[in-house]
Image: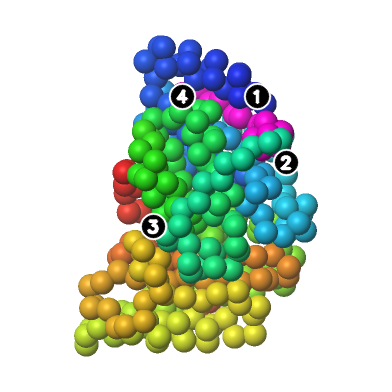
């Protein structure tokens, strides 16, 4: 494993690998790596002859300075975690400084003007511009054949896919399923900032998603599924928490769903909550059996079956 901080070094290593015929896989991260990130690195390693992992806490995607300041950073632990994977393919870790990624005088912002009217796009203005701009720059630096993103951040995944399509970027976008703690809490770098009581309350995010899935499953036996009922079942579980949003949107357009959907239709149920000063998000694709089963095991905040991650195979675009 090699760790480099400059664009020039990345380009040199990637060019060498490519000259040797290697497919280049890429996993962009903000560090504080956990098993969710590592699962994406494994997916990349299955398909590539060189895996590039970027670790960059991107200031442009933070809408709060305290969140940026408090974001966990531990490069040594990150490098050990990557080493610990024991991958057979070489790993190139790119750890740029802010000046390397956000140079003075840069005048270009990538805005994906669809997909961002709801959920995090609505509650964090400018967030997805920051994401799309840095991902575009990273793609320009690494020029990967494929890049792996987690379903944990579904709106981000959709924004990146749309950017790649609209700009005809030659990158396959591969998805990885959400990796969860045994009690269902989705792994997140921000979880490290939860104290014990906040950690307990955070479990209610997945319980809320489970309630939405349970409601959908009951309704689809008889007919269409009412998104308002999904929203209210999530609100009930989150009662008393500082809710940022609870919504049910179209998984392709991210438009809010206001009308009942046929029983076999897909809807994205999504929540964002502030717990102990930490903002956490989670979502489930209602109508996707694997995802439904994964969150349903946490209905009522109780784990009712052996924990599993959703195993729907990652698609490419
Ligand atoms: P981040 O470091 O938070 O910017 O995340 C980097 C990548 O890891 C993104 O593609 C995320 O969607 C993905 N990711 C974060 N948490 C998880 C998780 N629990 N399971 C799977 N992927 C995740």
Q: Nearer the viewer, residue 76 or 117?
A: 117
Q: Nearer the viewer, residue 92 or 88?
A: 92
Residue 50 badge: 4
In which image quadrant can residue 200 be found? Answer: bottom right
Q: Is residue 45 visible?
A: no
Q: Is residue 112 visible?
A: yes
Q: Earlier in the sequence, mark 4 or mark 3?
A: 4
Residue in the image at 55% along x and 15% along y? 12
**Element at badge 2?**
loop
Is 102 situated above or below 127? above
Q: Are marks 1 and 4 in contact (CB under 8 Å)?
A: no
Please state if 266 lies on the left or on the right of 234 as rendered.
left
Percent coordinates x, y for residue 32 in the rendering: 66, 45
Q: Earlier in the sequence, mark 2 or mark 1?
A: 1
Real-space Cα separation, disc 2 to disc 1, in angstroms: 19 Å
Q: Earlier in the sequence, mark 1 or mark 4?
A: 1
Q: Disc 1 designates what residue?
A: 6
**Element at badge 3?**
loop
Which quadrant of the figure contains the N terminus? top right
Q: Is residue 314 magenta?
A: no
Q: Disc 2 designates what residue?
A: 74
């Amino acid at each position: 494993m090699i760790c480099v901080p400059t664009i020039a070094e990345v380009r040199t290593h990637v060019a060498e690998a490519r000259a040797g015929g290697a497919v280049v896989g890429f996993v962009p991260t903000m560090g504080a790596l956990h098993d969710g990130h590592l699962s994406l690195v494994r997916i990349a390693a299955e398909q590539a002859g060189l895996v590039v992992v970027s670790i960059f806490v991107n200031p442009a995607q933070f809408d709060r300075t305290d969140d940026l300041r408090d974001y966990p950073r531990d490069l040594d632990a990150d490098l050990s975690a990557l080493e610990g994977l024991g991958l057979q393919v070489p790993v190139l870790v790119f750890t740029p400084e802010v000046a390397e990624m956000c140079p003075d005088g840069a005048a270009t912002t990538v805005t994906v003007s669809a997909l961002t009217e709801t959920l995090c796009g609505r509650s964090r203005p400018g967030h997805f511009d920051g994401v799309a701009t840095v991902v575009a720059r990273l793609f320009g630096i690494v020029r990967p054949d494929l890049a792996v993103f987690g379903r944990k951040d579904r709106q981000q995944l959709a924004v990146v896919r749309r950017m790649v399509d609209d700009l005809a970027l030659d990158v396959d976008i591969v998805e990885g399923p959400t990796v969860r703690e045994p009690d269902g809490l989705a792994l997140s770098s921000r979880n490290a900032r939860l104290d014990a009581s906040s950690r307990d309350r955070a479990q209610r995010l997945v319980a809320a998603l489970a309630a939405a899935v349970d409601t959908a499953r009951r309704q689809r036996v008889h007919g269409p599924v009412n998104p308002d009922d999904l929203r209210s079942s999530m609100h009930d579980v989150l009662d008393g928490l500082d809710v940022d949003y609870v919504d049910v949107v179209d998984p392709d357009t991210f438009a809010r769903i206001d009308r009942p959907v046929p029983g076999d239709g897909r809807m994205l149920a999504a929540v964002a909550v502030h717990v102990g000063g930490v903002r956490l998000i989670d979502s489930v694709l209602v109508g996707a059996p694997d995802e439904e089963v994964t969150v349903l095991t946490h209905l009522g905040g109780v784990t009712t079956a052996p924990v599993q991650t959703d195993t729907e195979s990652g698609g490419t675009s």
